[in-house]
Image (cartoon, rainbow, N blue to C red):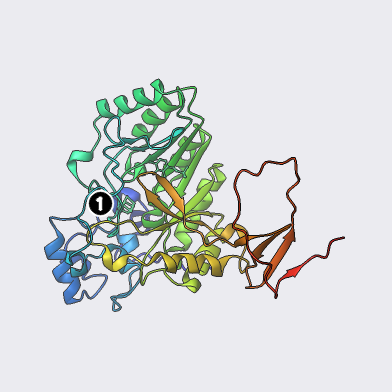
Amino acid sequence: MPHAVLCPPAVDRDEWTDWRWQMRNRIHSLEALRAYIDPTDAEVEGIERTEGVFRWNITPYYAQLMDHDDPSCPIRRQVVPTIDELEPDLVGVEDPLTEVAHSPVKNLIHNYHDRVAFCVTAECAIYCRYCLRKRMVGDADFFMRTGELQEAIDYIDAHQEIRDVLLTGGDPLTFNEAHLEWLLSRLRAIDHVEIIRFGSRMPVKLPYRITYELCDLLARFHPIWINTHFNHPKELTEDAAAAIARLASAGVPVGNQTVLLRGINDDVATMKALNQGLVRMRVRPYYLYQAQLIGGTAHLRTPIETGMHIMRELRGRTTGFAIPDYVLDTPHGKVPLHRSYVRGRAGDRVVMETYDGRLWAEPNPIPDDVDVPFRLPEIELPADVDTIDTD
Ligand SMILES: *Cc1c(COP(=O)(O)O)cnc(C)c1O
Ligand code: SF4
């Protein structure tokens, strides 16, 4: 069972579960933080020295999940700045995916032919230290005025090929219902927009944002999909599960995108517990992201081999749909980072590795009249291979 989040005795439960109360009472001073954790020197200095680089902000709900005494707490490391962020890195805090170059109008990224990522706001309820859009989140220049939102909507309207609109940010669910209704009704008025998706971390950092009122609103604009962003089993609370259940009842399929983070979730046991816990909450794991090259996040990134290994260890050892796709986002789209199970072709047989480390040779001759679209490497049939005898 996911554990419960207890409301601190000093706060009324009705206030605690009011998302606007949570937003108003976000923690962004050392003094307020000390009510939840005993910050280390590295955290105190990090908070003081990263202020101008990337803001910090934590909802009381999420703060409550932090371990008071353990600085290696996976919740704490996602949201509390440390001096590690000031270490020299391979790049600066910039735009790793050259999203600005792929933006025909402000904050609309048209990278794939048939779909766009539309960054409708730069606001977030918390600021994750590894954020891909660090350059924009919380930055006034990236906030969208109504006229700018309308320009992006006009662009989508003028481009018949766009059948899928991903609303992201920042966090689009920081918008109030009236604003969301304005946006959704304009997008729904465009015939060629088939699906609307939200990328939102609200179920994780502020599950009370998923109100019945919001769910009713979303249900009026179906098909609506949501991808959320759980990174660690500690985030799978009863309150988060209740938020997901409200979305599921409104007919909104919920997927999850996790970022692979060093010391937070970069081991098989954590990743398995996370994804199995998600499936239990009816959330379908979608992507596991290789952490992006963003300045000041070197301490959170892992070698790609670590992710590939974790994926290998999940396959066959848990429910197939508890396994996300491990991908790297590049300026040329997302690239799956999979160690191939297929070794190659030995004559009429294709040789592959099974999840438990054996070899299987599948009889699979290529008929003379079939043109294969590409060729597997030609290999010798290994001696220790298992196969079916054929006539
Ligand atoms: C991730 C992304 C999408 C959506 O990609 P899917 O693989 O369809 O989930 C669309 N546009 C941009 C720019 C993206 O980064
Ligand atoms: S919720 Fe998403 S957009 Fe917001 S700070 Fe975290 S990673 Fe960045």
The quadrant the N terminus occupies is bottom right
The residue pinned by badge 1 equals 134
Image location (x, y in percent) of residue 365: 75, 53
Q: Residue furthest right?
A: 391
Using the image, determine if residue 98 lies above or below residue 265: above
Image location (x, y in percent) of residue 372: 65, 44
So how many labels did they put on this image? 1
Q: Is mark 1 within 8 Å of ligand 2?
A: yes
- Give the quarter the ligand 1 occupies: top left
> Which residue is located at x 39 percent, y 66 percent?
6
Inspect the image, locate mark 1, and give the three-letter code of the amino acid beneath it.
Lys
Image location (x, y in percent) of residue 117: 38, 38
**Can residue 70 be seen?**
yes
- Of 277 and 311, nearer the camera is 311
Question: Is 8 on the left-hand or right-hand side of 344?
Answer: left
Question: Is 313 on the left-hand or right-hand side of 212?
Answer: right
Image location (x, y in percent) of residue 151: 30, 25
Question: Is 191 on the left-hand or right-hand side of 177?
Answer: right
Q: Secondary structure at mark 1?
A: loop
- Of 350 and 95, nearer the camera is 350
| Neighbour tally class for label 1: few under 14, some 14-19, many 20 plus, Cα within 10 Å | many
Question: Is 260 on the left-hand or right-hand side of 148?
Answer: right
**Can residue 9 be seen?**
no
Using the image, determine if residue 307 lies above or below residue 118: below
Classify residue 262 by image quadrant. bottom left
